[in-house]
Amino acid sequence: MSEQNIYLAKRKALGWSREYAAEQIGISDDKLERIENEKQLPNPQDVLIMSDVYQAPELCNHYCHGSCEIGQLYVPKVPNAELPGIILHLLDSVYAVEDIEKILVKITADNKIDESEVEDLANAQYTLERLSIMIEALQLCVERKIDQGEIDRKAYDAAYKKAEGRLK
């Protein structure tokens, strides 16, 4: 292993023994050892529990992007970044989206994508994917801050529901 297994790194960051972590997760010490030594992949349910117990929602993205066959095709790797960096990248992506609005309208006006429009379409898709990844990074950051008690879950959920109501 060139870099430390993410599940092992998260457990060690908490200062937990393998035995204690396995008990918290609800799996055997042997199974956790195999997962941490990359001799066995965790199943999705184990990853969900580990992400909750370790207060590390990024474990779900790591698993889906790296271990799930479908996720490897469709789930982008989301950076595990802090809020200021996420916001700067998110705003940069939003501004880039504003630039592609006219290009997308032009491409779709005749309901055909001709050869001269392919590069513009690819650039537009890349820009939108970058925006999507930064939105996911923000969501992971918020989940981590909720898990760590920096944001009150009930207050956040209530504010989110209120925002949903305004946008319907």
Image (spheres, helix red, strand yellow):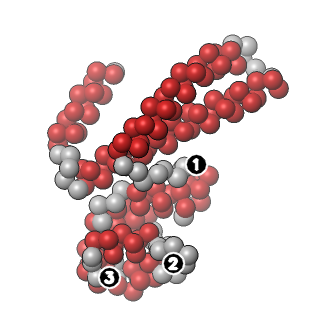
Question: Is residue 152 positioned above or below 88 on the image?
Answer: below
What's the residue at 32%, 82% (across, down)? 18
Q: Amino acid at mark 3?
A: Arg
Helix, strand or loop status at disc 3: helix
N-term mark: 2 or 3: 3
Q: Is residue 86 left or right of residue 1?
A: left
Instruction: Residue 45: give its label.
Output: none
Disc with the residue nearer the chain's start (1 vs 2): 2
Q: Which mark is residue 18?
A: 3
Q: Amino acid at mark 1?
A: Tyr
**Residue 155, placed above or below residue 38:** above
The residue labelled by disc 2 is: 38
Q: Is residue 58 above or below residue 139?
A: below
Q: Is residue 108 visible?
A: no
- The residue carrying mark 1 is 74
Across and down, in percent, residue 75 comes to 54, 50
* Left or right position of 166 against 115: left
Against 76, is 44 above or below? below
Earlier in the chain: of badge 3 and badge 1, it is: 3
